[in-house]
Amino acid sequence: MAHRREKGRISRARLYLRLLEYMLYSDTVEFTKYELMNKIPDLPSQRQDRISEILNSMMAAGHIEIILSRPNVTYYKLTEMGKNWYKEYGKEFLKFTSIL
């Protein structure tokens, strides 16, 4: 019998890279969690708290920053460090994870 993967589950590393990739290649400069969850394929199936954890990790690494925070919405922006890191390391790693 074939082993079945948990439906809809994406690794933390792949989520991180998908978010960076979307921010880098999007025509938009600022992003909300809602926008990210609804515009990136596969993300609507992820829990909001899981996306929040990834966004917090990205901020801790200096890859994104908050540009505006209101009581019910936060706007994020990709930093130069995030752009450079994705271009140097993330892009190839995302390709690698897609074949696993």
Image: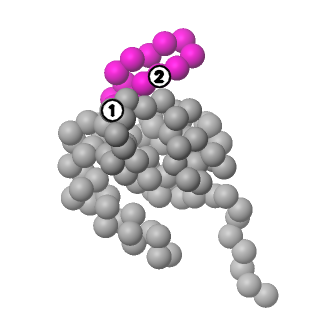
Instruction: Give x and y (percent) for residue 12.
Output: 51, 53
| Kind of residue at disc 1 | Val
> Is residue 29 part of the magenta span, yes or no?
no
Element at label 2: strand
**In the picture, residue 87 is in which quadrant?**
bottom left
Q: Quadrant of the N terminus?
A: bottom right
| Kind of residue at disc 2 | Thr
Residue 86: in sight, yes or no?
yes
Q: Residue drawn 42% across and 24% down?
A: 75
Furthest toward the bottom, the residue is 1
Q: Residue drawn 36% across and 43% down?
A: 26
Instruction: Give x and y (percent) for residue 100.
Output: 50, 75
Q: Residue drawn 49% across and 52% down?
A: 15
Give the label, 1 or 2, closer to the camera. Answer: 1
Circles 1, 2 touching at the beta carbon (< 8 Å): no
**In the picture, residue 63 is in which quadrant?**
top left
Which residue, given by chain and number where applicable, does mark 2 sit on? 74
Q: Residue drawn 45% across and 37% down?
A: 55
